[in-house]
Amino acid sequence: MRLYRLPKSGAIEDLTLAEVEQPRPARGQVLVRMRAASLNYRDLMVVTGRYGGGGVKPGLVPLSDGAGEVVEVGADVSRVAVGDRVAGTFMQNWIAGGVAEEHNGTALGGAVDGVLAEYVLFEQDGLVRLPEHLSFEEGACLPCAGVTAWNALNTERPVGPGQTVLLLGTGGVSIFGLQFARAAGARVIITSSSDEKLARAKELGADAGVNYRAHPDWEAQVLALTDGRGVDHVVEVGGAGTLPKSILSTRVGGSVHLIGVLTQGQINPSLIMRRRAVLRGIYVGSREMFEAMNRAIAFHGIRPVIDRVFSFAETLDAFRHLQGQSHLGKVVIRIG
């Protein structure tokens, strides 16, 4: 079988295609033939040596998000069967309930080997079945970006009809947020530096868009679009410098969901106090959330938005495409 490894991290060119012996499942394990994988910004940071303090273990197999079919099961496997279409959970041992420190050590494509391979061994508890209407390419978009957006908008303070959601940018998490917010009956405002992307987001259901390059004070534009009230939820993926604007965009008592490794920088506590805002850190989600999300995706017939699909041989080009930030939605690699 073939897979990609990182003998060292620092550049996309460090990704190395290798051949290894195909694994066999032990008791409680499942062998999945991977059909597709998708990229997140976290994966780009892993490959370029900017994740987790600057490095990962040598020889890491990257990527957290992938989908495939079960081809072999070990003894005592009861959750899935040969032929099932499945995806792996981002944190393999976070089944339900609140996140704990020990869950971090099972994050695919970072703490442990990921899914950029033709075959991957999973523990049976680390798998979920795909919604039947999705392709493998679409299913591969779900584990990180999809579950992250679901966790933000549908768990502790669920979005509801008549509320307004602000989404920053048009990457995978934000586009899933758009789809989930619309399914819940909420109004959506989205930001981008591209009028073309804003137009595409409106085609997908966004009610309004703000070009943050044309309007550096975009929080004022958001307030104007909500008659000065502010939004109920902000999915904050923008990075350093956007958090104060996100807080100022919320209604009094609104929620700001902090997502991703870019959300860094100093925070002025007075902004939080003034808006009585709730700031909540999101680090993907549990298997229970994944399965709840899949039920909603199946019920509403939601399909992940894919920007472009690359072949397994074009993996480095897929990373370069993500790095170029011209995409809207998810960048996918078709494995086999």
Image: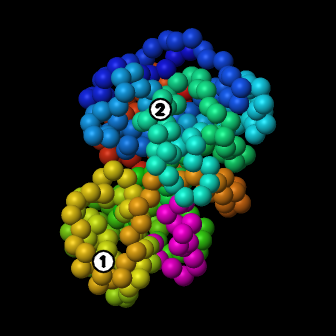
Question: Left or right: 61 with respect to 212?
Answer: right
Q: Position of residue 135 (x, y in %)?
A: 64, 40
Secondary structure state at the residue bearing disc 2: loop
Q: Earlier in the sequence, mark 1 or mark 2?
A: 2
In the rendered image, the quadrant that contains the N terminus is: top right
Residue at x-position 34% and y-position 46%: 326
Is residue 275 something that shows in the picture?
A: yes
Q: Residue at x 26, y 36 (%)?
A: 54
Q: Is residue 76 left or right of residue 321?
A: right
Disc 1 element? helix
Which mark is drawn over residue 112? 2
Q: Is residue 250 magenta?
A: no
Please identify the quarter of the rendering in which residue 331 is found: top left
Residue at which label 1 appears: 272
In-front residue for pair 141/307: 141
Query: What colouring does the structure picture have?
Result: rainbow
Q: Which residues are magenta?
A: 150-165
Relative horizontal placement of residue 39, taking residue 47 as reference (left or right): right
Q: CA distance from mark 1 to mark 2?
A: 36 Å
Q: State the residue at coordinates (57%, 76%).
A: 160
- Count the marks: how many? 2
Tell me: residue 241, above or below residue 272.
above
Residue 137 higher or lower than 7, as above or below: below
Q: Position of residue 68 (x, y in %)?
A: 64, 32
Identify residue type, mark 1: Ile
Image-quadrant location for residue 73: top right
**Kind of residue sitting beneath label 2:** Val
